[in-house]
Amino acid sequence: MASKNSCACHGVVVTLASCLLLVAAAVSVSVLAAHVAVGRVWSPAGAAAAAGHHHSLSPAWVPSPSSRHAHHARELVNRRVQVGRMEAGLVQARVSIRRASRTRSCTPDDGGGFIPRGAVYRDAYAFHQSYIEMEKRFKVWTYREGEPPVVQKGGAAFAGNDGIEGHLIAELDSSGGGGRHRARHPGEAHAFFLPISVASIAGYVYRRDMIDFWDPQLRLVAGYVDGLAAMYPFWNRSRGADHFLVSCHQWAPILSAAKAELRGNAIRVMCDADMSDGFDPATDVALPPVVASARATPPQGRVASERTVLAFFAAGGGGGGAVREALLARWEGRDDRVVVYGRLPAGVDHGELMRRARFCLCPCGGGEGAAAASRRVVEAITAGCVPVLVDDGGYSPPFSDVLDWARFSVAVPAERVGEIKDILGGVSDRRYGVLRRRVLRVRRHFRLNRPPAKRFDVVNMVIHSIWLRRLNLSLPY
């Protein structure tokens, strides 16, 4: 079974050192090249056992085998599917990535421009070769069936949505992006995009006086997937293991549990990368909540000698998790070097304080929400401020499969919140300079350049994360 807790390759159990994507947030991680050994195998019998409870709901915006799309669907299914050639290509990609790591060289890259190098990467050569293979091979089919509010279309998702979710969907959909990864028909697709709109479903269903709040939403999601499964063979042949959904909504982990296969097999691309809430970094993708303000190249901020604030954090009001509350209780208004606000005073500029600070505190876990943690991390990197992950162990940072976060951030266990000043004050000027230069190096991977997306920017890094998880999957269909 292609489950989130299994890693078997062609019938042989693979050790941690050779499994593709068991990343640092969950366990001790080997470099990317060691991950790329062979793909894990989906077992039809095991997947069938995990099928879970069947829901049914077929309003107009849920696909039905008898809908106007049915004839078109049959035509697509009847096209020749060269899966043998596709899987052979993935084998070649794995071999190329291993070779690049072993020989410390890559296939000549005709894309030009940036070449990933340096200590911020777990294995820069393996990452570069993997990125080249992704650009050359990776194809995604976006299901066209369904209507709002269940699904989001590429153009509609982008309109009025300057966040990463809308940009990514527009890049993958036929109405947006350069089309590099768009499959012409599902027979050539390595992965299938489920354009489920968690935010639209929540807004459509929610009523203040509702008694049963979750069931209607879960039925909509399950009904949509069931409709696609009845119309096409692609979901059933892998039990969703080569399908993915994208959502930055806080309810995405809950609604993705509408079907056991959706939660257990599919790739969930979510801003809420909280492992205590079911996020699995081996098969799920942490979506950094970048917004349009991060499009333009930001100033690098002040030089180290002008950064007079040791550490900075502003909660922004509202409720928060236990880690954030502990941070506020210990440091709010208590120190002129560790500047912590529950709410910024009038006239105080958040961005300017980040540019004046050496370190930016990013509380994670404890009910805080991984999306909020990732947002603070992205803001820190954008401002050229070294992020400090104050974590209880449940947070999975974005792109941990290729980026070595220990090389450009500081980790402080949640139980040591009271020691933050001593810990950060003990970082020498030389060490701080190294950390900050590395922050500036990785900043391109968190930059939003769409339209159009550029090589190695945040949109393409997310697509690369999806590619890696598909590369780790060997499907015998």
Image (spheres, grey):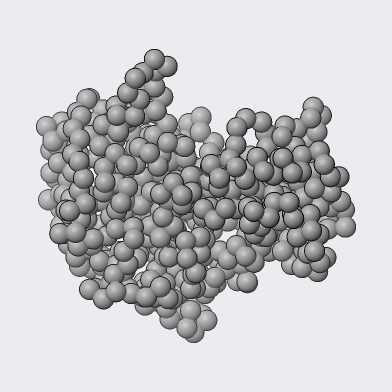
Q: Which one is in front, 406 or 321?
A: 321
Q: Is residue 458 left or right of residue 5?
A: right
Where does residue 219 sit, x and y in percent of width and height? 26, 31
Q: Is residue 433 left or right of residue 153?
A: right
Q: Residue at x 47, y 65 (%)?
A: 27
Whether residue 372 is visible to the viewer of this picture, yes or no, is: no
Q: Is residue 458 left or right of residue 211?
A: right
Where does residue 236 sit, x and y in percent of width and height? 18, 50
Whether residue 272 is visible to the viewer of this picture, yes or no, is: yes
Q: Which one is in front, 14 or 31?
A: 14
Question: In the rendered view, would you say 394 is above or below 73?
Answer: below
Placement of the N terminus among the 4 image quadrants: bottom left
Placement of the C terminus among the 4 image quadrants: bottom left
Q: Which one is in front, 79 or 467?
A: 467
Q: Residue at x 72, y 64 (%)?
A: 435
Q: Residue at x 75, y 60 (%)?
A: 423
Q: Residue at x 20, y 48 (%)?
A: 51
Say how many tags the image has.
0
Q: Please, which residue is most extreme toward the top here? A: 209
Question: In the rendered view, would you say 42 is above or below 119?
Answer: above
- Write down the quadrant of residue 34 in the picture: bottom left
Where does residue 203 sit, x and y in percent of width and height? 41, 24
Q: Is residue 212 left or right of residue 449?
A: left
Q: Which one is in front, 242 or 90?
A: 242
Where does residue 457 sit, x and y in percent of width and height? 55, 54
